[in-house]
Image: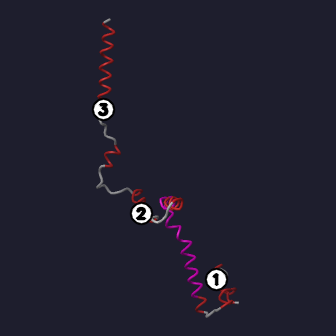
Amino acid sequence: MTISLRLLAASTALAFAGMTFAATPQTHPTTATSSMSTKTPTAQQQRMVDCNKQVAGKKGADRKTSMSTCLKGGVAAMPAPRSTQQQKMTNCNADASSKALKGAQRQAFMGSCLKGDSPAAAKH
């Protein structure tokens, strides 16, 4: 009978020890670092802030796609084709104006210039 009383006392002591251990707050590594707001953001955090500013007016799937592309570092490469096309349009338009082309001749010149045909073919 004394053994069962000892077992009962030991199990009660372990139960109280377990409750005390569970009630003790443990410091978690993320909790400690998140309380330090004076720390400079990591490169990924800064990229997130920058990309969020770039996609400010977008919503839904367009925003999600733009954020994904931006976070992967593809933002700088995306506008290049559009600005190249805009530059080509500006250059062809300036060439057509300098040659004083009008009407059908201008249309033919602009079409071949924008396609990237040779200047000799564009002059006909």
Q: Which part of the image, by quadrant, shows the C terminus?
A: bottom right
Foreground: 104 or 45?
104
Q: Residues within 10 Å of mark 2 (few under 14, many from 20)?
A: some
- Number of labels in the image equals 3
At x 49% / y 64%, what residue is drawn?
58
- Residue 22: give x, y in percent of width and height: 32, 31
**Is 92 on the left-hand or right-hand side of 2?**
right
At x 31% / y 10%, what residue is drawn?
5
Give the residue number, with chain letter if any, for mark 1: 113
Which amino acid, by three-letter code, is at mark 1?
Cys
- Residue 18: give x, y in percent of width and height: 32, 26
Which amino acid, by three-letter code, is at mark 2?
Asp
The picture quadrant where one finds residue 84 is bottom right
Q: Which part of the image, by quadrant, shows the N terminus?
A: top left
As drawn, the label of residue 50 is: 2
Residue most toward the bottom? 100
Foreground: 114 or 57?
57
Element type where label 2 sits in the image: helix
Between circles 3 and 2, the one closer to the viewer is 3
Between circles 2 and 1, the one closer to the viewer is 2
Mark toward the start of the polypeptide (2 vs 1): 2
Indicate whether 105 appears above or below 49.
below
Residue most toward the top? 1
Element type where label 3 sits in the image: helix
Give the residue number, with chain letter if any, for mark 3: 23
As drawn, the label of residue 7 is: none
Indicate whether 95 appears above or below 62.
below
